[in-house]
Image (spheres, rainbow, N blue to C red):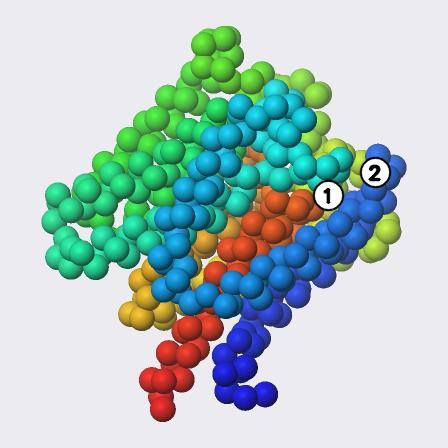
């Protein structure tokens, strides 16, 4: 293997992806042992991962400069497919539980555009920040406000389109990502502090309306009854109906029954819906116990640490690559915290998957697309280090 080939062999990222893939396959295999499932989810998940690996290989033919230049077109393409979703006919975009969030191509084949637009939005926001930094080497309050306005506008467009579906959980992911990028972009702390206070006030007001005036939230604001049940269950599970508590109780039962080392392969007993997607961490807890669950958390920590160090190391060479790392870090962080948090009862239940582990074509392939860009950043960081120490 020559030196150029060595650049493309990022051992740490390869091993991390391999570990996530194996755990995902084992957990989904256990989940589909429940009587409610009659589909081979493991085989489908393997196909999604293979497609994702193909994406990683394809992106390596582009350098960061090319990704930077095409980020606007990627972003606009994502906005178009989101905008067409609500007006698409039912045979292309079917309404499921009152939400139009998926394109359906063939029976059993569907695509959730909001998942892929997360990556194109992060890509474009990273380009916006790096271009702004290049143009305004010395920041002022005026230039910081200008950057803030751009970031909020470019994020607000996909958030608005996603809220039309409606998909509140996914929209919140976008807001978390842009919030993290605003903080890391070096905008004046006074502006950031004002934003944080405003965000706390808005969230507090929203929770107050949902808790104290649920009828108004449903009739006027369009909040769904099941969403109110989830929030109320999060605040006080003991006061809610058995139906509202069902997911919490089953998830806790699964995690607790796994004890220290779990029940092993093919021994899952606790039955609950969406075990292979939203509640895959509960399956891991029941199958592999506290040790297996802790290992999964450690894997995510190692991946997030890799994103932090990679972003810091590449910053001098490519601020664009660095900000993409930080944006993708934000995406992984909010998904991991929310998904694991809801399974253990510290966060309200949403449909946010556990990235790289939960079953789902859109989730896996969009995440692998993000990893593909991260892999390219790692390749270029390795090349720069090699040149530096020659």
Tell whether 136 sits left or right of 310: left
Q: Secondary structure at mark 1?
A: loop
Q: Is residue 232 left or right of residue 51?
A: left
In terms of image quadrants, where is residue 127? bottom left
Residue 335: x and y in percent read: 53, 45
Image quadrant for the N terminus? Answer: bottom right
The residue beneath circle 1 is 276
Asked if one can make out residue 268 in the rendered structure from this viewpoint, the answer is no
Q: Quadrant of the C terminus?
A: bottom left
Residue 88, position as x, y percentages in the image:
57, 26
Q: Residues within 10 Å of mark 1 (few under 14, many from 20)?
A: many
Q: Is residue 125 above or below residue 376?
A: above
Q: Nearer the viewer, residue 2 or 353?
A: 2
Q: Do the CB atoms of the residues marked 1 and 2 lie less than 8 Å apart?
A: yes
Please tell me which residue is depicted at 54% across the width and 36% down the height of the picture. Answer: 347
**Residue at 41% over, 73% down:** 381
- Mark 2, residue position: 37
- Disc count in the image? 2
What residue appears at the point 35 percent right and 57 percent down from the top-left corner? 69
């Amino acid at each position: 293997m020559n030196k150029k080939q060595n650049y493309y062999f990022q051992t740490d990222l390869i091993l991390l992806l391999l570990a996530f893939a194996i755990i995902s396959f084992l957990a989904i295999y256990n989940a589909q042992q429940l009587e409610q499932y009659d589909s081979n989810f493991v085989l489908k998940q393997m196909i999604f991962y293979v497609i994702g690996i193909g994406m990683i290989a394809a992106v390596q033919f582009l350098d960061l400069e090319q990704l930077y230049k095409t980020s606007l077109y990627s972003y606009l393409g994502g906005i178009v497919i989101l905008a067409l979703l609500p007006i698409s006919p039912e045979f292309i975009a079917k309404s499921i539980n009152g939400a139009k969030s998926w394109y359906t191509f063939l029976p059993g084949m569907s695509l959730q555009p909001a998942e892929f637009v997360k990556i194109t939005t992060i890509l474009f926001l990273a380009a916006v920040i790096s271009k702004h930094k290049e143009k305004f080497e010395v920041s002022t309050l005026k230039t910081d406000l200008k950057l803030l306005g751009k970031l909020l506008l470019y994020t607000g467009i996909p958030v608005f389109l996603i809220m039309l579906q409606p998909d509140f959980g996914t929209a919140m992911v976008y807001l978390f990502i842009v919030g993290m990028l605003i903080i890391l972009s070096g905008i004046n702390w006074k502006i950031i502090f004002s934003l944080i206070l405003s965000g706390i006030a808005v969230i507090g007001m929203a929770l107050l309306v949902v808790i104290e005036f649920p009828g108004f939230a449903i009739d006027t604001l369009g909040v769904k009854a099941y969403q109110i049940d989830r929030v109320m269950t999060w605040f006080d599970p003991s006061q809610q109906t058995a139906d509202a508590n069902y997911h919490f109780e089953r998830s806790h039962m699964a995690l607790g029954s796994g004890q220290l080392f779990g029940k092993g392969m093919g021994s899952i007993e606790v039955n609950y819906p969406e075990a292979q997607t939203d509640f895959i961490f509960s399956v891991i807890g029941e199958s592999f116990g506290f040790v297996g669950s802790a290992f999964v958390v450690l894997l995510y920590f190692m991946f997030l640490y890799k994103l932090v160090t990679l972003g810091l190391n590449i910053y001098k060479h490519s601020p664009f690559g660095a900000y993409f790392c930080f944006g993708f870090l934000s995406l992984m962080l909010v998904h991991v915290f929310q998904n694991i948090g809801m399974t253990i009862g510290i966060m309200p239940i949403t449909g946010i998957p556990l990235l790289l582990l939960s079953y789902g074509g859109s989730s896996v392939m969009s995440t692998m697309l993000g990893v593909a860009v991260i892999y390219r950043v790692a390749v270029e960081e390795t090349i720069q280090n090699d040149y530096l120490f020659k």
